[in-house]
Image: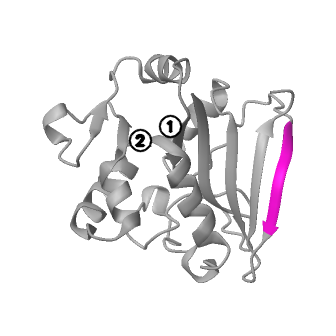
Amino acid sequence: MQIILTDFMSLDGVVQAPGGPEEDTDGGFAHGGWSGPYFDADVMGPTIFEALDRADALLFGRRTWQGMARAWPDRAGDPYADRMNAITKYVASRTLTDSDLTWSNSQLLPAGDAIGAIRELRGRDGGEIHVWGSPALAGQLVEHDLVDEYLLFIEPILLGGGKRVFPDGGLARPLELVSAQPAKTGVLVCTYRPAGR
């Protein structure tokens, strides 16, 4: 299976709390919801829908899964929400238990070796596992060379600090641009793959 990392990203690489003011205030982050004004339904909407249609499963860190689990179960009845609720969802967490996973089709990865479990999932036959948000988990996946494709919504704003998905360890990771599409709001919808893969 391929692991596809999807993120709304500021021009300076911040992915923290794109959706709302209270989404993630760690580190005193005060710009939650920064992505909303840049959403272009004509370009970004179809890209997100197509990505979800291609996905065989979703992979989340704890915080992102909890936010999604609060939002989607009550929205049943439209095709996107129904797909969100029906798809398999893997959750990496050291604190959640199986009894916490009340959102349909959610499966907890082993707390002691989530990266090993993800590596095993990636080794299976199949299509795509999509990672949305989840900056701490996404950063670990990048660090362990487990990301097969990046779908980035690069937005025209500098946030000056916040959580990022790219490690700062000094290791260069060349990428190849697969596609780039501008949105009328100034967002660039870019797909990259690790070079040589």
| Mark number, residue 61 | 2
Q: Is residue 57 above or below residue 133?
A: above
Q: Residues within 10 Å of mark 2 (few under 14, many from 20)?
A: many
Magenta segment: 175-181
> x, y percentage for residue 36?
54, 78
What colouring method underlies this structural image?
Answer: one colour
The residue identified by callout 1 is 137
Nearer-the-camera pick, 53 or 48: 53
Label 1 close to label 2 by CB (< 8 Å): yes
Q: Is 88 colored magenta in this rendering? A: no
* Sequence-earlier tag: 1 or 2: 2
> x, y percentage for residue 45?
58, 71
Horizontal side of 145 relative to 114 (left or right) equals right
- Residue pictured at 53% horizontal, 66% vertical: 18
- Residue pictured at 63% horizontal, 27% vertical: 146
Nearer-the-camera pick, 84 or 64: 84
Q: Residues within 10 Å of mark 1 (few under 14, many from 20)?
A: many
